[in-house]
Amino acid sequence: MELIISLIAGAVGGNAAGGILKNLNQGTLINSIAGIVGGGVGSQILGMAGIATGGGGMDIASILGQVASGGVGGGAALALVGGVKNMMAK
């Protein structure tokens, strides 16, 4: 369940980053895919480091930590994908 929350938050984070950073926007589908990958990876990395999770349960602190780490990971992945694509286009 925690992974699903992180993946959904990653997709939302990727699309939010695409909406805010117009020069990195890759369209809804690519934003969502990059966000899902980034959300899953970001959540796992922060979870292993013990930074963003509230202990792995389903309490409100844990869910908010999963949403935050998934969203940030999704936004970071989209920024990485968009930056690489823009560099390759030059």
Image (cartoon, rainbow, N blue to C red):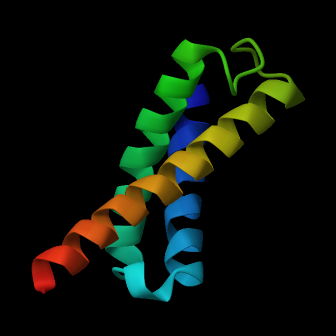
Q: Position of residue 72 (x, y in %)?
A: 59, 50
In the visual, does 40 lie left or right of 59? left
Q: Is any part of residue 25 visible from this angle? A: no
Q: Is any part of residue 7 visible from this angle? A: yes
* Residue at the (34%, 80%) spot, across then down: 26
Instruction: Tell me the quadrant of the picture where the N terminus can be found.
Output: top right
Q: Against 69, is 10 above or below?
A: below
Q: Against 85, is 79 above or below?
A: above
Q: Nearer the viewer, residue 44 or 8?
A: 44
* Residue at the (60%, 27%) spot, across then down: 2
All told, the count of numbered labels is 0
In the visual, does 29 lie left or right of 40? left
Q: Position of residue 6 (x, y in %)?
A: 57, 39
Residue 85 lies in what quarter of the image?
bottom left
Q: Against 14, is 72 above or below?
A: above
Q: Nearer the viewer, residue 10 or 90?
A: 90
In the visual, does 21 lie left or right of 85? right
* Residue at the (40%, 63%) spot, across then down: 78
Q: As drawn, which residue projects farthest toward the right?
A: 60
Instruction: Tell me the quadrant of the picture where the C terminus can be found.
Output: bottom left
Residue 34 lies in what quarter of the image?
bottom left
Q: Position of residue 58 (x, y in %)?
A: 77, 22
In the visual, does 7 lie left or right of 67? left
Q: Position of residue 84 (x, y in %)?
A: 22, 67
